[in-house]
Image (spheres, rainbow, N blue to C red):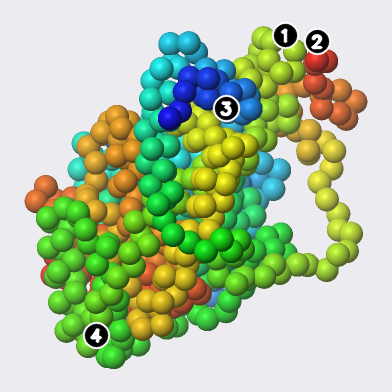
Amino acid sequence: MVTREDVLQMARLSKLYIKEEELDALTRDMDNIIAFAETISAAQCEQTDFDNISNLSNVLREDVVLPSYSREEILKNAESQDEGYFLVKKRS
Amino acid sequence: METNFSKIKAAGRLLSSKQMSCEELTKRYLAAIEKENKTLNAYVRVTEEQALAAAKKADEKIMRGEVLLPLEGIPMSLKDNISTKNIETTCCSKILQGYTPIYNATVWELLQNQNAVLLGKTNMDEFAMGSSSETSCFGGSMNPHHTGHVAGGSSGGAASCVSGNLAVFGLGSDTGGSIRQPASFCGVVGLKPTYGAVSRYGLIAYASSFDQIGPITACVEDAALVFDAIARQDPLDSTSQGKKESASASLTKELKGMKIGIVKEYFEGIDKDVAAAMEKAMETYRHLGAELVECSIPELKYGLPVYYILACAEASSNLGRYDGIRYGYKVPHYEDINEMICKTRSEGFGAEVKHRILLGTYVLSAGYYDAYYKKAQNLRGVIVNAFQRVFDACDVILAPTVPMTAFERGQTQKDAVKTYQTDICTVPVNIAGLPAVSVPCGFDGKGLPIGLQLIGNHFQEAVILNAAYQFEGATRENGAFRSVEMGVAL
């Protein structure tokens, strides 16, 4: 059973605001989905930790230093910046 | 069986025989987009300038008498979650409005190396979360076969533009069916490659252990040609493997003796017209010399909850990066950094995306992690093994792509669980990282296309594409396919 408090707690953790008028409908939807997800609780499976879907291994490149993006490019999409840094308002 | 349905080859012949310049071909597509996109809403951004520049390059090469590369000069589209340098890429979300990547996705880099002509970026469900493309901040993409119905999703725009002849091919992405389902709805071919076959570098992440980029095309041969062009090991994606069997060179193998698994769980509760089309498809395969093997994967009943738990968990983590600081939308007014991030995310994300973030956060949170996330992860292993059991006895699995045909506009927003259940035939493939292709196999009573899904073992793209190719050759002239009267005829 998902409660209004659960939804508010999840919203806090994921940095989302929920409007008071949306909360009941959202709680109901979440509860429906969780009830649906609940069907797996009856499933029997060994407690071995799942690792990999197809025995793939990572293919890693040589660890050599290569040129990367310039500071100007990285900052291009930031709305607020100052002297080559992202600008973020101080926490009050 | 040899077929001659390839639009990539038809366009290539027009260009190399100088019957039409690439500039003219490109302009025809741009004019068709101008005319039809109001109805289809397949493109969210048209890249006319880049397209004409690429066309000019191809024309110069033709004038010099040089041989064109397989995809050179071919007008195509990219889903809006595939990063394109200096071209806005938004995942059809308000939170990424105005974002122009500073690098290309590897798939686009590979296609650009062949000088493919990018017509534009295609519509999709916001962050690829949805089955109708209607969660897009630009509104849904419509079905060229019946514009009162959706193109499907999440790669709805990619399927719509290929079906409506507004691009020769498109790249989409498939996390739980997002290439195959719209391909099925729009009567075109959609290939979801094996996890690790195609680089995900530059694909804006939804659920990283499920996502794969693949082609949406007018026929099976074109899907093989595009797959061959994009399946590479990439130093920028360590999960990409670079398996090298050419899919397009494997298309003419006989099916005699091929064992096709009919997994009964895939056929439970499917629409009557879809069931009839599946029966006909099985009959076609018998005629082609394949042997049908009945089998069962009871574990498939856990497919949907396992998928939604794991995909939402990964999404909640992947979407944590959108904070308004480094790129994308940022609210204008706020008191402090916490309020800035919360307001930006609350205004920037649409309802479905917020739903999935909350759900993902829930299943990962203390107290619920073992019951949901860990259990689903273990069941993922169980489903992987169950598929391997079937592939011990069969070469491919035949199933419907979707249990129904295209939804009417506005139908999917009403009941989340019911909408999620329509993905029942597509998600198991992503859970197990398998390749699968959807190929048109008929129509329902309303004239809406039905798709046949062929699933293979890991890295067996050549096998499923050959099986699809033989089917297409045997059925296409007999009503399994109908081209739409709009866009550019090739």
Task: Write down the residue under mark 2.
Answer: A92
Residue B480 rendering spot, x and y as whole percentages: 18, 65
Badge 3 and badge 1 in a common chain:
no
Question: Looking at the picture, which amino acid does disc 1 mark?
Answer: Glu
Badge 3 and badge 2 in a common chain:
yes
Q: What element carries label 4?
A: strand
Residue B256 rendering spot, x and y as whole percentages: 27, 90
Question: Looking at the picture, which amino acid does disc 3 mark?
Answer: Met
Q: Earlier in the sequence, mark 1 or mark 4?
A: 4
Task: Write down the residue under mark 1.
Answer: B335
Quadrant holding the C terminus of chain B? bottom left
Badge 4 vs badge 3, beta-carbon distance below 8 Å? no
Looking at the image, residue B451 lies above or below residue B263? above
Task: Write down the residue under mark 3.
Answer: A10
> Which of the 4 quarters of the picture holds residue B20?
bottom left
Name the residue at 72% across, 8% down.
B335
Left or right? Give the position of B411 relative to A27.
Answer: left
Q: Is mark 1 on a helix, strand or loop?
A: loop
Badge 2 vs badge 1, beta-carbon distance below 8 Å? yes
Of B309 and B216, nearer the camera is: B309
Badge 1 and badge 4 in a common chain:
yes
Question: Looking at the picture, which amino acid does disc 4 mark?
Answer: Glu
Badge 4 and badge 3 in a common chain:
no
Q: Mark 1 lies on which chain?
A: B
Q: Which chain carries label 2?
A: A
Badge 4 vs badge 2, beta-carbon distance below 8 Å? no
Looking at the image, residue B139 lies above or below residue A44? above
What whole-number distance in Å separates the C-alpha atoms at marks 4 and 2? Answer: 70 Å
Task: Write down the residue under mark 4.
Answer: B291
Q: What element carries label 3?
A: helix
Question: Looking at the picture, which amino acid does disc 2 mark?
Answer: Ser
What whole-number distance in Å separates the C-alpha atoms at marks 1 and 4? Answer: 68 Å
